[in-house]
Image (tube, rainbow, N blue to C red):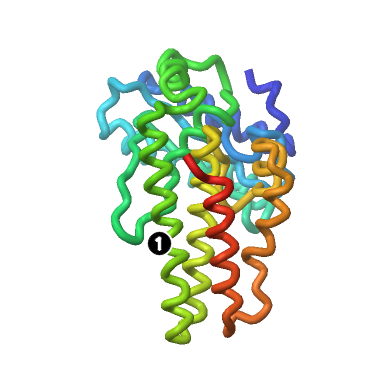
Amino acid sequence: MISPLRFPTEIHREVSELVKDFFSAHAHVDTILVVNSCARGRAVAGSDLDLAVLITPAAASQAVQSLETMWQEFSVTHPLIRQFRNTGRFTQVHVDVFDGRMIPTVWDDGGGPDNFEVEIGNRLVYAAPLHEVGAYFRQLQSQWLPYYGEDLRLSRLAMVREACARDLEAIPFYLGRGLYFQAFDRLYKAFHEFLQALFVARRTYPLCYNKWIQEQVIEWLSLPELYKELPPILSVRKIESAEVGEKAEALRALLDRWACP
């Protein structure tokens, strides 16, 4: 049933029904999910419609490619989807077919952040099913929720913290060479890594690291005092100065205070 979903427009609902009818006809499909803003009732008229289609473990890798290809061929010519895309300049229908395998990556020097926790959150926690969920979806929820195992969590937290600290430590080097934009790029990357470490430290799956930050930090993590310190980190008045270095020091202090094991 999709009635509990609060779609922003009727055409969002109609396209979601179309997607459900298309994919539910295939034997390997376990569960069809609405994800992102529409799933959370935060979408507006110009919002994308994002869906994720979970296929069963028995399906071969070719099944994923085949389903994606068939959907692309179908969606390109369907008049309802064309109509939907014409409702806004940036309005699109995104359908991801996935097999449920969540594999944590191991970063090399310069790696990070990644979407491991984001993917679990958006597909298993914050998604809204378009129909009754399948057995495989329930299995994945029991495997990954409320959070993944402690050994993995501690190793992930250590990896993310190390990457964040490394990026912050590189900033004075770039500033010393007059590479101010590169220094800011490292600061922005470290900011995302800090958010990733913050969520891992608190055993909470995030939505993303560049949207809905206020909602996630204040409402989900109950850290309004921390949120007050986040916007100033990326608010740089003069990039060709030592200011980015000062922001890096402030972010390092937040890392040590809020994202420890």
Position of residue 10 relative to residue 241, above or below, is above
Quadrant showing the N terminus: top right
Nearer to the camera, 190 or 31: 190
Q: Position of residue 148 (x, y in %)?
A: 43, 28
Nearer to the camera, 41 or 222: 222
Please give left or right for residue 169 compared with residue 82 in the image. left
Nearer to the camera, 211 or 161: 161
Q: Position of residue 37 (x, y in %)?
A: 65, 40
Position of residue 91 relative to residue 147, above or below, is below
SS for callout 1: helix
Please give left or right for residue 204 compared with residue 212 in the image. left
Q: Residue at x 45, y 57 (%)?
A: 164
Instruction: Name the residue that disc number 1 marks.
Output: 166
The answer, for residue 77, to whether it is visible in the render is: no
Q: Residue at x 58, y 31 (%)?
A: 126
Numbered-mark total: 1
Q: Position of residue 218 (x, y in %)?
A: 71, 42
